[in-house]
Amino acid sequence: MRRCAHCATPLGDAEGAEFCCAGCRTAFRLVHDLGLENFYRLLPDDEQLSRPDTAGDYRSWNSDDFLREFASCDAAGRWSVRFQVAGLNCYACVWLCEQAAAKLTPAAEFTLNFATGIAELQFDGDDRPLANLTAALARLGYQATPVRPGEALPLRTDWLRLGLAAFCAINTMSFAWVEYLATPGTVESELSWLLRGLSWLLTTLSLCYSGGPILQRGWQDARRVRPSIDSGVALGLVAAYGYSSWHIRPAGAVYFDSITAVIALLLAGRLLQKRVLATAERQLLQGTTDAAAYVRCLAGDCERFVPRSTLHQGDLLRVLPGEVVPVRCVCVAGQGEISLESLTGEAAPQLCMPGTLVRAGAVVGTKALTLRAQEDGLGHYLDEVRRVTRRLLLDKGKLGSLADRLAAAFFWFSVAAAAVTLTVTWVLLTPEIAVARTMALLLVACPCVFGFGAPLAFAGCGAHALQHGVAFKNQNAIEGLAAARRALFDKTGTLTAGAPSARLLHEDVAGVSLPLLHAMLGQAAAASAHHVPQAIAAWALQNLPAPQTLADASVTEEMAAGLTVTAGHHKLVLGHPRFVQKLLSVPLGAEVNTRAQVCLAFDGRLISTFAVDDPLRPEAAALMAALRGLGVIPQILSGDRGERAEDVGRQLAVEATGDLSPVAKALAVVGLKRAGPVLMVGNGFNDALAMGQAQVGVATMAASSAAKLAADVTLLRPDLMDLVGAIAMSRAAVQAVRRAFVFAAIYNSVSMALAASGLVSPAVAAILMPLNSIMVTCVIRASIVRAPKSSRMEAS
Amino acid sequence: MTVLLVLIPLSVAMAAVGLGAFVWSVRNGQLDDLAAPPERLFIEDIEAIEDMVTPPKR
């Protein structure tokens, strides 16, 4: 198949076309003009780039206002600006951006961090290369969004904490083993003092700097009488530290090595989790930031397409159905629905009329709205999305919250056990022994497994999934996908190729100006995100004479029904037969047979009918079989006409329902949900409601931003079979967490019993503590690694 | 065994030098991006290839 020479989008059979859009042609020419053709050789074969958008004005990036807000200046007068670059797919993209920067702004220093997608540009105050560079990056298909100083910094502090903890742990452990291995009494007292003194120093360092955040959080949670995992860990660490400091003289029991080892292992696990979350967040944001990168700004009578970052408070905007509101606005004209579902989870759309306040990130429903911005566009929408995404990412799943509940119960249990041990041994034996045993008990009761196991399993699963083309939004998504027993699919664009072709069934165009008709169909396709106008426009391109230029045309669209184009005194209606009939208010007559799916009316008269065919994706049948193999029942919920949905259902041998409006789809999901967990796979704005209602919403790669925002899982590759791999991976992760919990419950009970009976000496604790964490890591690692990672593996 | 009284602090001091090197590398951003540098290693080679003018594969 022919592909776009720049972004590799399949072009179909169109003769002579080398590019899918004007933006790609510009990008290709720019790459050639800069002498960077090697980019296309560096790209992996299956990589599809994001399409560049030629519109866009980054001139404001050179303004003083911009620099004051986003740049920092050092003493030597050198400016430094950081911005997020969206659309980075692989290293070839990083190479292209860096090389382009080197050629365009040789005096400035440009670095692009592939892990975070954040670029930093350093330049002298006099030459301002920012606007030039960001506009060039946009033409290449990479959109820049500024980052405020102090935001989205790399994890340097976490690395430093971990580094210090590891340093302290290794030294303290090596000192401790001198005493463990020597025959009692043979270590000279000077040497013993030296070793213990150094260990105390290192442990104090480790506890204060590296363990500081754990102690702080543990104390805060305990004070609110909601002890968390950190409270248990902090209690164990502080008890062991206090006791060891008191018994620092030679021959006393000290636990310095256990304390430092626990801190180092906990920090390692948490750093790993943070890195995976950051990567997942970037992958998820990539699809959503593009959504409102450009906005329609109304100035006087003309409408300009400008980058969001140049938007100012008080500007007028027009937002079309399906588009995302870029900043907080107040509605000034138009009346329609807005959906806040991607922001709040509230499924019912809200009515918006002049005077209504609209939050950034809201999705406009059926009617275009004119809004007045209440804040500047610089970074605001992104901030909102990022806040929401981060909340979702940090939102703990059921097992995560189960871990919290268990940790709280375990905290109280270990406090009670410590109290009982203290009292009993105090009465029966000496106070000295009582304190020693209680401290040992508190240390081994430290619930590392709870703090370590679940995050590790989910982070591991998330990282594996990312490598295999699936981004999980949070733990809930992983748990939900593992539990799902029914998979609901949207048809158009999800199970089908989504690039349908129109077939003319009947035509009566006598007296209609064909160039005008062609031009109006082109307007319809440009204004709508729906596939039918696109297919009809593609048909027009092949079969109608070249379009004439239109002075003024306006398009109004009704979701999932059709649209109207008005140009001068001419009116064109395109859509579902029912929609066209409603607007024409005359019976369509016998010429519209049942096969017709789309009717076209011009100036109140039906002029043609079309059938629109959309072939099934090649992997659809294999996907259904693989899902059944996993015990998941596939089913189709389509907004398309009933017979078309049933036809596809017959081909794939699955139950299929058609004629569902977005709300009916969501209601169907609610009904099916009662029978067991469901997952909903979709790609469009009309699926977003249903995806929000299902336990897990899955968005395909080509999904609209509304669907991606509503989804818990996003497929990053076009292949639907990745879903099968994702289910297998999520099941493995949940299984691993369950195993770790069982293991932890047994392990901690046994070790606490041992401590209470006085069998846990510092040497035994030194072995038990890290061994515990390492064993849990191995259990989880083994469970995840054994999971089938490739969907192909699962299918074969 | 008194030599240990010198050797042990010395070993800690040497390890501290290692820690110092680690702190320096973190502060200099060496650990900020662990994904791109390994790839960069190979790309420099490609740039050096003579046949820069060969047409792109697409």
Image (cartoon, coloured by chain):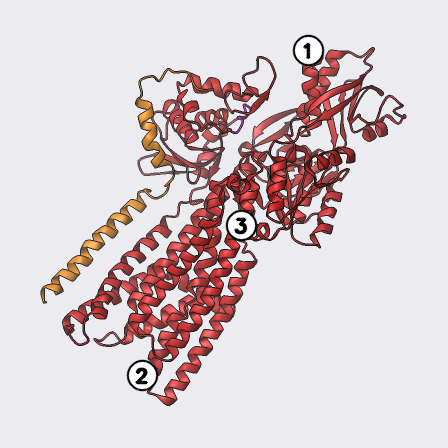
Q: Position of A394 compared to B35: left or right? A: right
Looking at the picture, how far across and down is residue A620, in whole percent? 63, 35
Give the spatial CA distance, label 2 vs label 1: 97 Å
The residue that appears at 16% across and 61% down in the rendered structure is B8
Q: Colour of chain A?
A: red
In the rendered structure, which disc, 2 or 1, sits on the residue that comes first in sequence?
2
Identity, as a three-letter code, of the amino acid under mark 2: Glu
The residue that appears at 48% across and 57% down in the rendered structure is A454
Q: Nearer the viewer, mark 3 or mark 1?
A: 3
Q: Nearer the viewer, mark 3 or mark 2?
A: 3
What residue does disc 1 label?
A546
Q: Is residue A50 magenta?
A: yes
What residue does disc 3 label?
A730
Looking at the picture, how far across and down is residue A405, in whole percent? 53, 66
**Mark 1 surroundings within 10 Å by alpha-carbon count, few (fewer than 14), some (14 through 19), many (20 or more):** some
Residue A432 — which label? 2
Looking at the picture, how far across and down is residue A226, in whole percent? 52, 68
Q: Is residue A256 magenta?
A: no
The residue that appears at 58% across and 46% down in the rendered structure is A712
Q: Provide the letter of the chain coloured orange.
A: B
Residue A201 — which label? none
The front one of A378 and A790 is: A790
Q: Position of A602 compared to A626: left or right? A: right
Identity, as a three-letter code, of the amino acid under mark 1: Ala
